[in-house]
Image: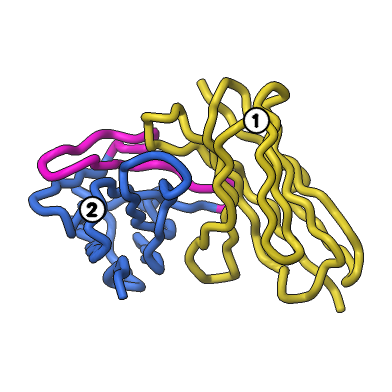
Chain colours: A yellow, B blue
Amino acid sequence: ELKVEQNPLFLSMQEGKNYTIYCNYSTTSDRLYWYRQDPGKSLESLFVLLSNGAVKQEGRLMASLDTKARLSTLHITAAVHDLSATYFCAVALSRSNYQLIWGAGTKLIIKP
Amino acid sequence: DAEITQSPRHKITETGRQVTLACHQTWNHNNMFWYRQDLGHGLRLIHYSYGVHDTNKGEVSDGYSVSRSNTEDLPLTLESAASSQTSVYFCASSEGTGGLREKLFFGSGTQLSVL
């Protein structure tokens, strides 16, 4: 059974600081997603990572995937208040199976 | 622009009533999914469909049903609403082709309260 664990589940940080959110999964998978959710809103796709060593960057966010360690990281550089949100990782059961198993989410609060 | 819409946005119902939540997408996507979101659980898959007349159970399907009669719609029915089904429900769709373009597009969600 595929399980996905995120940590931390809650993170409060100051603007300008760097931090990393971790996503561990329990069985082999070759497709991992990061999503963002603002309070009371829907989910927005940030990154799709397909292969070992994949790295994607968008602004102050950078995601990477290590399939051998079954680990993905979402790194925040020089955080700004607008990045406050809940971040989810989700892992596909397989390349041909479109079901996703979701982490519990990391609530990120960035203080001015 | 293509979109995915859910209705209603908010619904209050009583225990034992049948409730149907609507989901309509204009992406022409093959795949459609229903999730529920509860604090501390992330998203949990209720039902999903990979095409017209195809439906499958997810990890928390008990008490829910879906049908897919066309590409655009996947309504979710709660046969006899229970208080444990109070939650936020999200519908999502994806192309179904795999690869980097294979990502979920989500509706705005339905807040359902069962009293």
Q: Nearer the viewer, residue A89 or A103?
A: A89
Name the quadrant containing residue B89: bottom left
Q: Position of residue B102 (x, y in %)?
A: 41, 46
Image position of B83 (left or right of A20):
left
- Is residue B37 something one can see in this rendering? yes
Disc 2 is attached to a residue of which chain? B
Residue positioned most to the bottom: A112
Q: Secondary structure at mark 2?
A: strand
Which residue does the numbered mark 2 point to in the structure image?
B76
Q: Residues within 10 Å of mark 2 (few under 14, many from 20)?
A: many
Say which residue appears at 50% left-offset and 36% top-offset.
Answer: A101
Q: Position of residue A2 (x, y in %)?
A: 53, 25
**Over which residues does the magenta segment extend?**
B39-62
> What is the three-letter code of the residue carrying label 2?
Leu
- Mark sitting on residue A52: 1
Say which residue appears at 18% left-offset and 59% top-offset.
Answer: B72
